[in-house]
Image (cartoon, rainbow, N blue to C red):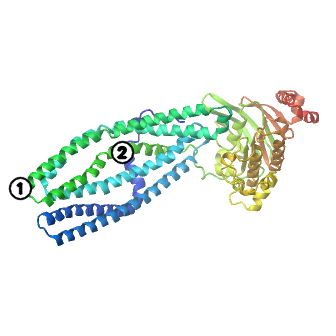
Amino acid sequence: MAQFPKKITDDPYTAAVLIRRLVTEQGIVYWRRYLVAFALMALAAGSTAGATYVLGQVINQAYVDKNIPGIAMFSGITVILLFIKGVATYGHMVILTKISNAILATNQRQLFAKLMRESIGFFSERHSSEFLARLTAGAKSITDVLNMLVNAIGRDLLMLLAMIGVMVWQDPLMSFIGLVAVPPAMLVLRKLVKRIKGLAFNQFTGTADIMETMQESLQGIRTVKAFTLEETMQKRIDENIAIVERNANKMARVANRSNPLMEMLGGFAVAGCLMYGGYAVVALNATPGAFFSFMTAFLMATEPAKRLARLNIDLNSQLVGARMLLEVVDSPASEHSDDDKPALKLSDARIELRDVSFSYRTGETVLNRMSFTAEPGKVTALVGPSGGGKSTVLGLLLRFYEVTQGDIIIDGQSIGAVSRKSLRAQTAYVGQDVYLFRDTIRNNIAFGKPGATEDQIIDAAKAACAHDFIMSFPLGYDTPVGEHGTQLSGGQRQRIAVARALIKNAPIILLDEATAALDSESEKQVQEAIEHLCQNRTTIVIAHRLHTIMHADSILVVEGGEIVEQGRHDELLRRSGRYASFFRLQHHDAGTLAPISATA
């Protein structure tokens, strides 16, 4: 997983900047809905304040005027006001929830779209669980921040002002007594904000670590079982969970550390109001209704006051998650859109590498001035020891990476001068590690050509020698393949991948050890499917099993990022060079290749 900065204060995303961005870039889009929600919040606050005031009138009608009709009237008004409050509260909560869901969906789409514009190298440096955490927790944090701000202004602040209005109306001096606890409470809360930032950051990264361990354990469950790693993985996730648990407990202690002091200060304020209010009723002939109304408003004001006082703490806790999402969205895409470039136009599909050099990291050369030509409609094979740079050639042809020096030319056009989309649209790729999506066989084949007809899908499956085994399943082409295609055998997955490449009908075929992991029977079936795929197409194939490329039109032996031998199978054997050495070694290790050797 990518390493995050050690200090959150080192990050340019300050709380004020983040809040301003979220409000102006995301919240402002729904300003009309927010306006309606604010109006409903104001109505709820006004109804609550009205009910608080009317309760005082009920007390006066009962204990001072002894007026039963007056009691009934004011009681009825209280019911109406509380009903209005309930309807208004329901309305603004539904509106805010809908806005939150829309913003959440927008941010998740935006992050996913950004990830789709990143290069292969970007993902090779990070763990996928990091992005899952940013996609879920980060997107939700943004909606939580906006909801906190709206509720703080529209619900808590308006409610607090309404209650203070009732208090001041009933007794200004007693209101002043009730508010003396505010300044010391704010001073205490301010000191907790910095501590909360660091803890929230650790909580986010710790949760991502749990997701990483969980994901790796489940995706690699066969390896876990085969090597009896259950206890090891359990220990690892236990440690991750323990770290998150300890951090969560710290957050709970820090975030709630102010509560005892605030309650104590509030207790002093309430006691002061009770003493003065009681004295006013007894000695100054104040009405009990006014005293009751004041205390009701005062007690109802405490909760919104507490939430407003904690707003800075809660905001900073959620802003960490928002920052985690935005820093990915804001970063420059590592695979810039080049749709404005001209499209690749093919006539013969001749591929030329001209003095191509490439390095993944500075000082570590993978390809060194490599040059060769893949002739149109023919098969060019790359063979040689692992780590020689063969797969890198295919990665450069697909522009997963850009060449460091030199150029790759297709029909006289530099692939760097044409759009990636047009290049990849005319190239079909089948690798050793076939990736099938968790979908049906039909849809996995159709991914090669969106909108493909049923006949096209079936024809591609037949050409890939897959139709018979597909129809042997009860659901046929509607058979789910499972996660990563685990419900199919290796050979079946490979043939589905070949069918996906066939239906694309691309003039350029790239094969990266497509049969290396298969048994002899499956290899024979897949090899037959590949022969259909390569007919009349420019094909570059990487192979470790040399008998699979014996009939290639050109064989290139790649070592150390350079081509050390080139020719046809029989020519290379007569030279008794590196290819012949590889071939004889494989022939010695696999007696089943005797007939092939005789042919050679």
- Whether residue 182 is visible here, answered yes or no, is no
Query: What is the spatial separation of the Cα atoms under label 1 and label 2, in whole angstroms?
Result: 44 Å
What is the crowding at mark 2: few (fewer than 14 residues within 10 Å), some, or many (at least 20)?
Answer: many
Residue 162's image quarter?
A: bottom left
In the image, what residue type sits under mark 1? Answer: Leu
Closer to us: 577 or 23:
23
Q: Is residue 586 left or right of residue 187?
A: right
Residue farthest along the bottom direction in this orientation: 69
Residue 548's image quarter?
A: top right
Q: Which residue is identified by label 2? A: 314
Task: Say above or below: 177 vs 155.
Answer: above
In the image, what residue type sits under mark 2? Answer: Asp
Residue farthest along the right direction in this orientation: 598
Q: Which residue is identified by label 1? A: 284
Residue farthest along the left direction in this orientation: 283
* Residue at 43 percent of width and 38 percent of height: 201
**Circle 2: element type:** helix
